[in-house]
Image: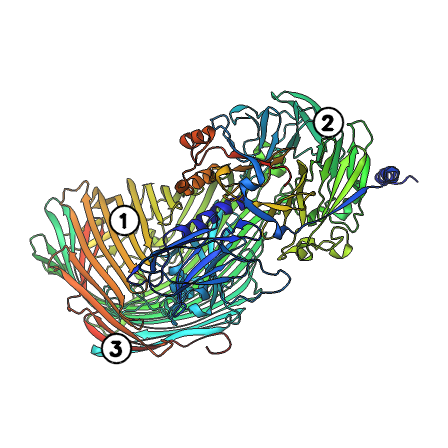
Amino acid sequence: MRRSRFLIIAAVLKLLFFLPATAQKKDTASTGRLEGAVRDSVHDYDLVSATVALYLEKDSSLIAFRLTGNEGEFSFAQLPVEQPLYLAVSHLSYITRYFPLLISKEKQVLQLEAINLVQKNRELPTIEIAAPPVQFNGDTLEFNASAFKLDKAAQAEDLLKMLPGVIVWNDGSITVNGKKVSRVQVNGKPFFGGDTKVAIQNLPKNAVDKIQVYQVAGSPGSILDSLLEVNIKLRKGKGVGYFGKMAAGAGTDQHYEADAGMNFFSEKSQLSLVAAANDVNKVAKDLNTILRNTTFKGVGTSLEYQPELMVQGLHSPVNAGVSWQYDFTPDVGSMKINRLNLNYFMDDMHESVSRQSRSEILLGDGVGNIQESQSAYKRHSSDHSFSSKYEKNNQLSSFSTAVSFNLGSLHSNGNETTRSLDYDNLPQSKDVLQSTDDSRYQRLNWTIEAAGRKSVSKSHLRPGDYQVKYSLTLSNNEGDRARESEFTALKDMTLSRHFDRKYEEKRKGTDQLLDTRWGNFLPWIVGSYSPLARFNLQIVNVLELRQGRDDNKAFDRLKSSDDYFLNPLLTAEQRNTVINEAPGISISRNFIKSLYQRYQKNLLAELILQYQFYRQKNESTQESQRYGLNAIKFTPILTINYLNNQYGAFQDSYNWTLEIKPDYPTSGQMAPLVDSINQYFILLRNKALKPADRYELSFNMRHNNISGIQPFNYFVNLNIGAINNPITEDITTDSLGRRTFRYINLGTEKHARIGVNMNKAFKFNSNLLELQLNATSNYINRPNSINGFANATGSLNNTIRLGIAYSAGQFIALNLSQQFYSYLAVQKNIKAEELRSRTYSTILSASCNTTSRFTINTNVSYNNNSGYGIENFILWNAAAVYRLTKAKDWEIRLSALDLLRQNRGVFYEGSNNMLTTSTVNVLRQYFMLSLSYYPRKFGRKTQ
Amino acid sequence: MFPNPKTLVVFIFTLLAHVVVRSQDPVEKQKVMIDPLNAMGGAASKYFDDVQFIPLQTTKESLFGRIDQLFVTPEYYVILDKDTEAVLFFNKDGSFHHKVNRLKFDRVFRTGSNEGQRRSIISSISIAATGDRFYVRSVFEPNVLYVYSFDGERVGKIMLPRYTQDYFQLKNGYFVCKQLRPYSEKRINEFVPFDISIVKDSLSAPGFYLPVNFRNATLLDDLSMHMNYFNRGPVDSVCLYSPDFSYTLYQLDAGGIQKEIEILLPKDLSIPLNFDTDSIYKGKRQEWLKGKSLVHCIWAASFVKNYLLMDLRMTNPAAVTLLYSPQSGRLITLDKIAADIKTAYLPVSTGSRSEMLFSDHENIYFSVPSVAMFAAKEAARDKHPVYPALLENYFNTQDRKSNPVLLQLRPKSNL
């Protein structure tokens, strides 16, 4: 069965080579045609899947290649005329033959006599002068890197892009004949975190021996029958080496950036060291982000880890990290792993954000409130993250354990002035707030996972399959806050308030989670041959234990005094304990319907019947914070996965999940310490809060067309749900614009979300055209209470992006996209106007390699935003990059950001009866000159 | 003190078998030297008198998955499809006749797989020597043959020796049986120390042949899966037995081993001598074979006309189907036959063609999936082939999801 399925895949793969020639270099007069057939005349048969490759004689560059068809036939079109060529014909078991050729202007179709190959002497090893571009080796399609002549600085990605049927998409994913490559390995192992980009954009083509494309079996729990993998096999001796990037740049307005990443690898070990610092909003959330964006290939039109001109505020991060992977078993297969990972990442960030915002708050027909605020904050955060993971897998069992330790600190200070106006723009109140925060945290997490299943021969014995996952998280947070607030009630000065308050807050937490599955019990209970044994019965149990201890102190200072005194109402020691025990049973059944060589349909259904026994207890030195909450909830989950694999046509997968789960209120929602320092946000207690019942139905569908070489795939996901008695807000706004919040259970919330992602690619010769559509739409009808009136806010949020990308070989890449964002909120019960906001953006980005050394990148976006006093603007960035030295390992880059000096930060935030439009300080025009060096060595000896 | 009854039974079997073996006449031996990688190919018209593509009618009733077994009787093509658990009968023009899919076993068997893949209850079928019935074996009772008439009525039951793995019924009604190798050394006392037994019926005592020492020989966990040990011999009263890890074919009749045909292969393609029985390979045979491109067994062997037809299994390529003419010494590879006008430019060797399914005195049968037939038709469009009416109709009315097409090849005489 597997073999036959492969035959069809192989047949489809082979079909590619009968289509128009994959020319790498074409003369302007490329009108020649060549036809022929390859035979073994000694044994009188046509040679199927022999490799026929055409080269230019002058520099031996590959022009095109084919695998021969069922009758040994081949043909090439669009060949250069009047240029000496040679043809290489090879086959695994045969001696390679070479033929000089010239296609004349007069006779542009050259029909060759049958080409006869002679078998190799099987007893004697044969040394091949040149490897053929492509060949089948058993079940693996192999592309030989040495057959493709590329620029000396070419990377594995350049090689992949040349292979017929292979598409490296704009987002970095790879498909082969429409089927997505599940992972790219190097010498059979994940390469520096497993990110495809790190492998294909750093490995020089000259270090690559072969690109291997093959199928592997899906994971045991997956209904997907097989996965497509690509392995980059390095040339002998090239499995050891290092590569990286060191870059530094200086710009106008004293802007700077520097990043460095060094990666060392051997057969068993991989070590990465990264460091980065800048003041141009290049924010890396982890080590892999820096690795992905310090590749030799460069960033092209990618917008990740770029100077973020659209992000709120100015950021100056300093990052450093180290990652080490060690394989105890160097010959790693997908089912056999013995691997240790150690990682450290440091993120030190200075931020400066100044914001002007205007919030529209609806209270009824013609009644409302406007809040205008100006704020400026400076933050300095420092985070350190250590993590380690050990995993050991074989065919029947897997084990992994991971420890991570995070610690960090945050210091921030700032001020905010808020004015509250009525609908006639008459001021009601004003608040001036000064704030300072100092906090520290430590968090230790340990997880251990083990799973095992019995071999098929023992499946009738006692239930032995198991999955166990345990995690322990210990956390410690300490913080000191200071707030000084001057609230002025303009209509009634007696309501004005002054606060000068300091907070000392400590929180310790211990969270534990034990998730277990055990079974299958049915063969044991009813016998292996009972009809019931077709089902899978497992016992499942999730035990969650969370303990938190808060020690909060607040001190106030009166205007008339220099001393702070303890505020007893805001001082409390609180202990919160949550125990959530959820035992249940899982019943599942896998149906497979297949018709040999036509289709395979799998349906996997699982029903988990589970009860949650929930208990929350809050103890506090403050009477008002003491409460207990007990609940028993039925939380069933039904999941259905369906796969329809029509051989040679398409592959569809559908997933449905239906679940009922409760939303439990937190102590912060039920019993906060009521603090009125921010008169525009006073959170009140409600110890009567009850758990809400959430009903969710989600569906997603994925389609992959595998019938042709022009891939088409789409992904649709849909989620609809309802929450009975949701935990929502009761908001009261008074005539001064002061607002109090209280969480309450009210009515029924309904929500729906749909997302569509569609990709279509056209690959012709070395040109690639991609069409992409991404669209999401969110609808939520959420009950709330506005000034004592039961209301509901219906909001609709749409984001649509339509993109078209075109690349012509390594010469040019264009990316044009149109983005549309809109927000609409309608109040259902209080009579009020609609709240609306929207943004249109048209973005064009282009990358052009005018020579193999010189590249120009540019991107222009036109932004049209709605809102009070918001102007349209154009953001235009450009960069010129030049690669120096023969190895192209030095790079000079001149970047010009925000050339028109129009950049603005406009952001929208809507919830309930409020819509906030903010303009935030953003990075503005600057120019930067940077120099990069790419140290690299593949193999023990320098090339 | 009485000996263990199992040991006693084995001892008696051994004694009887020695008597049987001793009483045999000297066995005729023949050596055939072939090099599979130097077998000849050529155009179809060079080797075949007749090439027929027989589309098997596709209706809601006759739709089936794969041809797990094919038998050709004077009236029907009889097909076992394990996907749909059915025995299908097609007329000789490919039209659907009927199917039998409600088979009655003495016990109600269930397949207990919770992996979702429906395990077939039927392990194999065969046509009875009388030609008007068929035998069905289930995976649960490998030594029981349920006898069915062609119209699906159960008419009897035959007990074969315990642990029968494969069997063949000779024209005279005798059953030649291959015993399963033990799962492990702990259980060898349950098995008779012979690979082959020949028995007239359930009541008769069997004759035992080809002794085996389980202490050194390959046990079940070290064998490659092999499901086609027996095929028709040069005449209907003889069958050909092709063992595991051996290149010797045994011609067996009711009286035992009639002839041994030793296939000599080039050294670079051969497994070591006595690979099956040498203790140094004990428990390591599969490991030893890994990464080596060797012929590890003759999967099937039979006689067509006066040619020896063999299906060899190796690592790369996975299978080689050969036709050997003892008269001329010519070796033809059926995997390298080119399509030509005789095949209407439809493939007879490539395009996902099946393994060899059946052979009789005249013809060799394969099948081609419809998805490959339509792809081949498209590929040969430029050659403007003329299809027989049956095929023309097939191409006009069917699609890639239709039932596979039978391919019948009749080799020329005097190859």
Residue A479, x across and y down, in percent: 35, 68
- Sequence-wise, which precedes: disc 3 or disc 1? 1
What residue is disc 2 on? B158
What residue is disc 1 on? A775
Q: Is residue A818 visible?
A: yes
Q: Are marks 3 and 1 on the same chain?
A: yes
Q: Are marks 2 and 3 on the same chain?
A: no
- Above or below, comparing residue A100 to residue A667 in the picture: below
* CA distance separating discs 2 and 3: 90 Å
Please state which of residues A612 and A350 is positioned toward the viewer in this rendering.
A350
Please state which of residues A773 and A597 is positioned toward the viewer in this rendering.
A597
Colour setting? rainbow
Chain letter behind tag 3 = A
Residue A108, x across and y down, in percent: 33, 56
Q: Quadrant of residue A329?
A: bottom right
Image quadrant for the N terminus of chain A?
top right
* CA distance separating discs 3 and 1: 38 Å
Please state which of residues A505 and A262 is positioned toward the viewer in this rendering.
A262
Residue A698, x across and y down, in percent: 37, 42
Chain letter behind tag 2 = B
Q: Quadrant of residue B84?
A: top right
Q: Which mark is residue A929?
A: 3
The reply to whether dot 2 and dot 3 touch (C-beta < 8 Å) is: no
The reply to whether dot 2 and dot 1 touch (C-beta < 8 Å) is: no
- Above or below, comparing residue B65 to residue A483 in the picture: above
Looking at the image, residue A930 sits to the left or right of residue B261; the answer is left
Q: Residue at x 48, y 61 (%)?
A: A132
Amino acid, disc 3: Leu
- Element on which disc 1 rests: strand
Amino acid, disc 1: Ala
